[in-house]
Image (tube, rainbow, N blue to C red):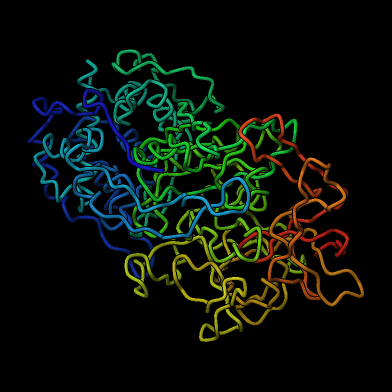
Amino acid sequence: MRGSAIDPTSAPGGRRTRRAAGGMAAAALLLPLLGAAPSPSATGPATGGLQRAFASAAAAYHVPQSVLLAVSYLQSRWDTHAGAPSVTGGYGPMHLTDARTALTAVPHHGEGTEDARGDSARPALHPEPRVPDASALPARLETLPAAAGLTGIPAAGLRTDPAANVAGGAALLAAAQQELGRPLSSDPADWYGAVARFSGAADTATAAAYANDVYDVLRTGAKRTTDDGQVVALAARPGLSADTAQLKRAGLAPAADDGTECPAAVSCTWVPAPYEEFGDDYGNHDLGDRPASQSIKYIVIHDTEGAWDGVLDLIKDPTYVSWNYTIRSTDGLIAQHVKAKDVAWHAGNWYVNAKSIGIEHEGFLAAPDAWYTEAMYRSSARLVRYLAARYGIPLDRQHLLGHDNVPGPTAATVPGMHTDPGPYWDWRHYFELLGHPFRRAGGAKGGLVTILPDYARNQPVYTGCTTAGEPCAAHGSSEVRLYSDHDEDSALIKDIGLGTAPTTGVNDVSSRVSTGQQYAVAARWGGWTAIWYLGQKAWFRNPGGQPTAVAASGRVITPRAGLTSIPVYGRAYPERAAYPAEVPAQAVSPLPYTVPAGQRYVVGDELPGEYYYAVTFIADSHRVVTGADLYYQIQYGHRVAYVRAADVEVRPSV
């Protein structure tokens, strides 16, 4: 959840009295490039402008062009975001940070209260964001002013002009290389230390993880069309081997070996959530024995709605809620707070809490241009791959959930469930980084679809990002809107559990499906597809020239013969007879939804009824109750849900 800090001595180019090779002369060479990047062409992607800017900046500051491209790719994937700052105040393709300018106001998606141990209200996990005090911001958040000092280019130009921004990044890299006593070599292998310093990390582990990612990009290469329609490419260097010994001379603090549960390829630090007793209550998580006592089935993706420092303040409060990990936007640093064996209070659904690991990502749902960095996406993907392998969690959208996919545990809680990370989280790219990209997996008669829009081109209208009812900035999205008929003028699909009319609001998930989710096909009409969704037939545009879903096949449930409809649940709790005398039986209460006869919903998992009893500070009384009743997890609406196995038939989707 909140911002970051850099040791001024480790900020690249921090000593403004030193100029990179070329200095002001190089800046003069680059000034004609300002404003040179073309806008997208109506007939296809623009080419050349940004690629030329990388070449010119590399030549002017004597930085290998491939290194400059790879660093920029990790910072922004070469996107410009129309000059808008990232969540940590970074601008442009090089993510030059100017937090004093950027971090003055942030939107908030205002989602109700957070469920903690059980299903009673606790403090909100996403309160009003805490914006860092500009007067106290460390130099780490201020690399753009350093770049201005090195190049002579005004800060406004570095923020808004992509070519100037690239020049600023090149100057910072060259300055870092010289401060390490290294020559401005043309060999990319010689720049490992400077790249590590460019990350702004204060410790060797974080800096090394960042530099290793940059060199992975160098080895594999990349090519993509940016958000302003330009094609940028980096040729692969598969045999490239970096001089990693340079990191020893970077003057960074040693990495702490503090027993975190993280893969070796990321930087991870231990910032514990306090397990403390206060008054007649305790917080802010429960001690457990997972996976020995119960399986871990889910990983829940959150955004923080705040900056790094404030979030770390919150996790240290025993009266607050908890989550397992937080990931920093600037460099992908991971902080672990709760061990995987224990149960954090993060999902708003006690059943899901007991079966999941929660990961917060520094960012804001309602700020489409306060963008997530590639460094954070990659660090998160590595962590999720590690956790999935360790605990046997399938890498699919039935087990890797957004907080917005977690169901309300009871009917009363449905309206207050959270909606992060929201429509701007790039699930398609995230699963590519996980090594499990979404693909067509069945023929036209497979009976299912996997939602898979082109993120950049898919730009539904959302409202309420800054002002209620006002359109959000146009932006790529992972989500596709649903209608009651094959017509965009028809009504949006209504979620009866919310009790309100559907809207295009950025937090209204009632009529939206998300990338990677799978649904049973109900009908087709021209360039439209209908799916079964929340007990209704829901239509979305799916034209052949720009599809928003691909064919799939799998297993589905439908009500057992003779039943007109069956109940839907927000948790898979055991039957009453399963509870021992010392554990109060929990109600198996349905949500305000049904699955009518004839409808079909995709099966995500088969689960026994299970309840984790943990209501005291002393863990001796904690129990895991497992019932004989079985449930199927299904993709019911935007959120997952559960149905009793006794109520349904399971069939192939074909």
- Place of residue 560 in the rendered image (x, y in percent of width and height, measured from the top left): 89, 69
- Number of numbered discs overlaid on the protein picture: 0
Q: Determine the residue positioned at 74% across, 56% down.
A: 633
Quick check: 488 above or below 307?
below
Horizontal side of residue 426 vs 234, given as left or right: right
Give residue 338's position: percent from left, percent from top: 55, 33
Residue 269 at x, y percent in the picture: 45, 26
Q: Which corner quadrant of the image does residue 453 belong to?
A: bottom right
Residue 142 position (above or below residue 560): above
Is residue 28 shown above or below 409? above
* Location of residue 635 by image quarter: bottom right
Give 140 or 567, whichever is nearer the viewer: 567
Q: Nearer the viewer, residue 315 or 454?
A: 315
Report x, y in % for residue 578. 85, 47
Quadrant placement of the C terminus: bottom right
Q: Of residues 113 and 307, which is closer to you in this image?
A: 113
Extreme-front residue of the structure? 279
Q: Residue at x 57, y 75 (%)?
A: 499
What residue appears at the point 26 percent right and 55 percent down from the top-left corner? Answer: 105
Residue projecting furthest to the right: 562
Left or right: where 473 falls relative to 511: left
Point out the image quarter for the N terminus.
top left
